[in-house]
Amino acid sequence: MVRPALPHPLPGAVGLSHLSAYGWEAADEVCGGSPHLHLVCTEAYVVTGGRGAVQTLSPDGYRDITLEPGSLVWFTPGTVHRMVPRGELRVTVLMQNTGLPEAGDAVFTFPPELLADPGAYAAAAALPPGIGPETEAAARRRRDLAVEGYLPLREALLAGDDGPLRRFQRAAARLVRDQVPAWRELWRAGALAAAERTGAQLDALAAGDFAHLDAAGAHQAAPTRIGGYGMCGRRDEYTLPGTTTPQ
């Protein structure tokens, strides 16, 4: 019987968190989170309360997607996204490849000079530990930097020019390239192991072997940090198999 590489991951080794969008007003007089993209992870929003939108940038253009209770929206790697509250927006986030976003798969839309300097980027993206005033101030500065870089990308797309967005995508890919070996190990232990485990179970059932059912059991978890400062808003987090320390 194949044992999980990680003990009792969530289905498919996905990540899970709950978000309340930031209410801070940005330079464009819009409240919301820090625009960013993921390099290899698809992210989904399940809206559980309030209303708002997610603004997305992709080679197909700019979209402002309405979020309301029951909405399900997801975006694939390379899609810049920015959560915008229009009320007390509350979202449950499902993240592919648990652990990878926190390990650097998520890249903020900082201005080009920061993206070109890994040390400067890391310093601008880092937050002090905890959830006190110093951390809040740093999270707000980080958000403002991301919006500063995001607005020219959006303006260019609205004018029909996807060149700046594509240059940002390339800069993000260069920025994280050295981290790929570590990501690969997280993926092998998480999402890949989950898929391979299902394959082994299917093979066993086809052969009349159901011994893996002997390991059946229920598991539960509660948030281990309430109100942390995430990319999009205040974040309730779970310590689950495969997760890493949030940025």
Image (cartoon, grey):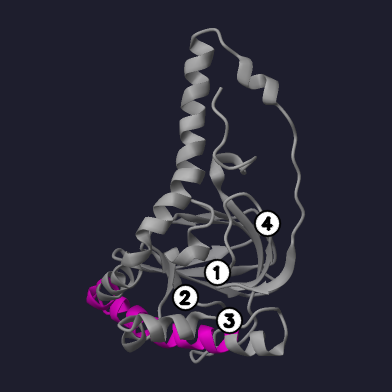
Q: Quadrant of the C terminus?
A: bottom right
Disc 3: which residue: 127
Amino acid on which the number 1 mark rests in the picture: Ala
Identified at 62% across, 83% down, the residue is 128
Q: How many other residues sit within 10 Å of disc 4, few (<14), some (14-19) or many (≥20)? A: some
Q: Is residue 247 left or right of residue 228?
A: left
Callout 2 secondary element = loop
Label 3: few (<14), some (14–19) or many (≥20) C-alpha neighbours in 10 Å: many
Write down the region rendered in magenta: 139-166
Give the residue pinned by disc 4.
239
State if disc 1 and disc 3 touch (CB < 8 Å): no
Q: Are the residues flagged by discs 2 and 4 in contact, CB closer than 8 Å?
A: no
SS label for mark 1: strand
Q: Are marks 2 and 3 in contact (CB under 8 Å)?
A: no
Image quadrant assignment for residue 168: bottom left
As for residue 75 lying within the magenta part, the answer is: no
Q: CA distance from mark 4 to mark 3?
A: 19 Å
Residue 226, image x, y percentages: 75, 68
Spatial separation of the CA atoms under disc 2 and disc 3: 16 Å
Residue 74, position as x, y percentages in the image: 49, 55
Mark 1 vs 4, N-terminal side = 1
Of the pair 221 and 73, the residue shown nearer to us: 221
**CA distance for labels 2 and 1:** 13 Å
Circle 1 Cα neighbour tier, 10 Å, few/some/many (<14 / 14–19 / ≥20): some
- Residue 150 forms part of the magenta stretch: yes
Magenta stretch: dominant secondary structure: helix
Q: Quadrant of the N terminus?
A: top right
Q: Tag on residue 35?
A: 2
